[in-house]
Structure formats: C-alpha cells, structure tokens
Image (cartoon, helix red, strand yellow):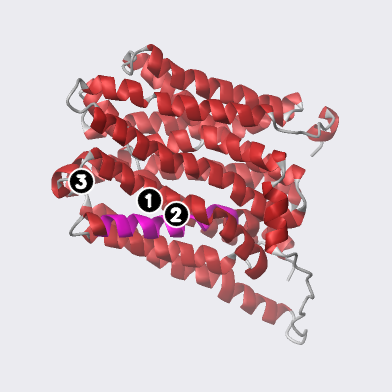
Amino acid sequence: MDKQASKYRWIVFASVLTAYLLIVSQRTAPGLISYQLMKDFSVTASTIGLLTSIQFFAYASLQIPIGILSDRFGPNIFLIGGTLLTGIGTLIYSIAPNESFLLLARLLVGIGDATIWVNLVLILSMWFKVNEYVGLLGIAGMTGSLGFLMASVPFSIWISLTGWRIPFFSMGIILCFWAVLLYFVLVIRPRYMEKVQSPDKPIEKLNIIRENPIVILRRVFSDPHAWATFFCHFGVVGTYIGFIGSWAVPFGMDMYDMSRSDASQLIMIGLIGAIIGAPLTSWFSFRIGSIKRTYIIVHVIVLISWVSFLLFSGNPPYYVLVVLFFLIGYGSGASALTFVIVRKSFKQNEVGVVSGFANTGGFLSAVLLPSMFGKVLDHFHLVDISVGYNYGFIIPVVFSLIGLTGALFLMEKRLPKMQLNNK
C-alpha cells in the first residue's frame, strides 16, 4: 500500500492529532488546581512544584531513548502505549488518596506524554510527502496549543462545576479509549488494507543496516548545532510550559485577586499567542529566507517579556500582563522552528534522535522552573507574596538568555528566496 497516496492517511492524521490534543491538555491541567491540592492534601508550594517537575523530568529524560527505539521498532506501538499510559496516570490522579499517588500518577503521565511528539513526527513523515509534511507539522503545533487551551478556561469551568476529580477521571477514560482506537487505526486497519490490496504479495523483509545507537548519540552530543537546538528549545518552551503548568493561575489569584476561572484566562491569552505563533513565524521565516534570523527575533521578544515582569516588580498593570502572556505564548508556538531546523540540517537517520534531544531541552527547563519557582515562593512565604514572585521571575529570565544564546549559535544553510517560495 502506498501510504503517501492513500486517502486513509487523513484518518491517521486526524486520529494521531486528536491523541496529541488530549495528551497535551493533561500536561498543564493540574496547574488549575494547585491551591486546591495544597488545601486537600496539606502540602507546600514546593510539593506542588515537584508534582509538575516529576512529570516533565520523565518527559525530558525519555526523549532521546524514545527517539532511538521508535527509529528501530516503529512509532505506532509507542504512540499507542503512551496514550494508554497517560490515560491510566490521569485515572490514578483523579482518585489519589494522598500525595504519593499524585506523584506516581504524574510520573506515569510524563512517561506517556514523552512518546507523543517524536512519534507523531515520525508517523507524519511515513504517511505524508515532504511538501505536505512541513505544513502539517505547523498544524500539529497549533493542535498542541489548542490542547493547552482546553486545559484553561473550559477545564477550569468544568472543575468549578463538579470539583476536580470528575474532570480528570473523565479525561482518563477518554484517553484509554483513544489508545484502543489508535491500535485499530494504526495497526489493524493498515494490515487489512495491505492484505486486500496485495493478497498474493509476500511480506517483504527489508535488510536495514542500523547504526549503533551509541555511535549516533556520541555524534549528536558532540555536535554544536544539536546543542544549539537544545538550548533554543530550553529557552522558549520550558519557561512557558513550566510556568503555566504550575504557577500562572496562583500568580493571577495572588497578585490580582482573581478567581481561578479568571486567572485561567491568562493562560488562554498565552495559548492564543501560541496558536498564532506556529503558522505566522513559519510564514515569516520563509518570507525573509532565514529561519535563524526569525528565531533570534522570537527569542529576543520572549526575553524582553520575562524581563518586563522584573521591571514591574512582578506586578505589571493588567493590560501589560495580557500583552506579556500573549508574547510568551507566541514564543512557545514559534518553537516549531526548532524541528524545521533539525529536519533541514541533519541526516534522515538522525532526525528522530536530534528531535528528541532538542525536545529534551524544552522540557528540562519545564522540569526545573516549577520546582525552583516553588522554592523561591516558600522562601518568601512569610514576606509579601509579591516579593516571592518578583525574585521567582529571575528564573525564566536566565532560561531565556540561554535560549537566545542557542539561537545565536544556530547554523543555517540559507536557501534562495525563490527556492523557498516554490516549495
């Protein structure tokens, strides 16, 4: 079966993107109930930060292994298993009797979440032609932002109406069901179609020469360009995800006396920026003929946005706050450029590993930021809370500087504008 010419590829695309949407929605949804968890389980801000950090630690630490294993054994089984594991973790989270079960649940969610992006990229590359792939990757980035959007105001309203356990339990059931559906879409149905279209054709076994993973890893770790993509993602992705996934809602409630629903609207503003960021930044980079220059601009915007929180002592006027959340979200959406650079700069057999490596950077900062921010807040809990937030914002400023450094060291083979426009 010619997958790239089959109309069935659009069913695959829709199914995989829906899985991504559902999984991403559970990546940051717990940030909506940070205060509720502190009250229900009598835990500190540091523990809440640890809940977020352990999830992103699992995600970040598994990116490279998942990339290697998916290249060797195929992406389908890992995407299906990851979706199922995320569902099971979300179910455990919804019925957790104490903080130990909460930690276990977020660990399982982090492991399941770790499988989604790298395998989504690989599945799209198998089912779609190159000229379709670039555009669909941008749509996938927008879908992730919509998943975050789901976990803001809509999920917050649901929590307000029913309490926090029912929404998480329901999402766990949906994810487990979707894992079963993915098995049918990605495994059962393609096998059947292959058999129907070529009933007498024997299954070909390709003798693929696979390079030693250790050799690949050594080459990646010694490549300055791979590290540049790692630091780029570190600066724009983790700062945004780590903050909105843990402290954005408490920040709005503490500093602006907002309700949880109102504070979650700040997240929604950032998500609107992220949704716009992926397609707009891709279009702009092709327009000027340089991904590197575009990405540097993005990193400067994100850095200035985080610095602005310090300039206003952690309490900018509300209209400025809205703009800042939008710009920080925009930077996260524009991070899809990282994978465009990887695709253009590395060999096909290295794209999966380098994509996982770059993605590790983004989620390493997402691991570090919530926990570090929580410790800063705990340190200043006896003082005015605004002091804690003001010092806490130093963390994303430093992380953003690291990201900008990575962008400056990107190496780009400039293509003629005419060639870019004809793609």
Q: Is residue 137 above or below residue 12?
A: above
Element marked by disc 1: helix
Q: Residues within 10 Å of mark 3 (few under 14, many from 20)?
A: many
Which of pointers 3 and 2 indicates the residue nearer the eye? 2
Q: Are marks 2 and 1 in contact (CB under 8 Å)?
A: yes
Which circle marks residue 37 in the picture? 3
- The residue at the point 73 percent across, 51 percent down is 219
Residue under the image location 60 percent in, 34 percent down? 279
Query: Are there few (<14), some (14-19), or many (20+) residues within 10 Å of tag 1?
Result: many
Q: Quarter of the image containing the C terminus?
A: top right
**Magenta-drawn segment:** 101-118
Residue underneath mark 1: 54
Magenta span: helix, strand or loop, mainly? helix
Query: Which amino acid, by three-letter code, is at mark 3?
Result: Leu
Quarter occupied by residue 90:
bottom left
Decide: is 155 above or below 209. Answer: above
Q: Position of residue 198 (x, y in %)?
A: 75, 81
